[in-house]
Amino acid sequence: MVALGFIGMLLVVRPGGSQFTWTVIYPIGAATTFACFQVVSSHLSKLDDPVTTNFLTAFVATVVLCALVWMDQAETLPALAQVRVGSWLLVAFMATMATLGQALMLQALKRAPLSVLTPFSYGQLAFAAFFSWLLFGQVPDMWMAIGMGVIAASGIGTVLMHGRKPTQVETIVQTID
């Protein structure tokens, strides 16, 4: 299913096509980082308090972003000085929503395996396509839509392959029958 998802990503990105540039590294890096983040969060949700896990996630992200800003300070710092208060409020709102989303994801990971929860994140594809159309007037072309469908199908396939494991009571009942 991972290979199928990767094929879907290749259909969306289309290496060798006119739209394939070095900037494609950003979404590929984001997807890879997010996948690693989900796996680590899944393990931490069973071992540690959600508040601690959320704090550590935010701390690591802050350190990494500060390092990136420091590396490119000649370009970034003057631009940051020109950012308006309204934009900073939007950033604070986005950070608050991300923190809330992370806390809810950690609670979900306590109650269900990652393989069951991951397909819900594929809803992001539909929302991204919708807002791309709504805000920027860009509609995914046929290959992009097919690629997004293949990615979603790989997630659904993962859930179907891993399926719901029977509870202890169901196992005992099956043994008795």
Image (cartoon, rainbow, N blue to C red):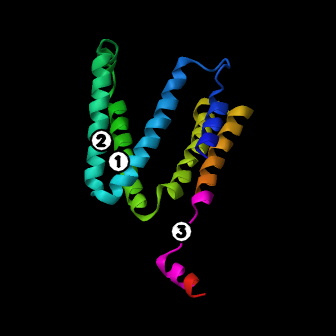
- Looking at the rendering, the stretch of residues picked out in magenta corresponds to 160-173
Residue drawn where x is 30% and y is 58% of the image: 47
Q: Is residue 156 above or below residue 143?
A: below
Residue drawn where x is 61% and y is 40% of the image: 3
Q: Tags 2 and 1 in contact by the CB under 8 Å rule?
A: yes
Q: CA distance from mark 3 to mark 2?
A: 33 Å
* Label 1 Cα crowd, 10 Å radius (few <14 / some 14-19 / many 20+): some
Residue drawn where x is 42% and y is 58% of the image: 109
Q: Which residue is mark 1?
A: 99
Q: Secondary structure at mark 3?
A: loop
Determine which quarter of the picture holds residue 86: top left
Asked whether residue 168 is drawn in magenta, I would say yes
Q: CA distance from mark 2 to mark 1?
A: 8 Å
Q: CA distance from mark 3 to mark 1?
A: 30 Å
Q: Secondary structure at mark 1?
A: helix
Q: Amino acid at mark 2?
A: Ala
Give how far across and how far down residue 42 sits, in percent: 40, 53
* Residue furthest to the front: 175
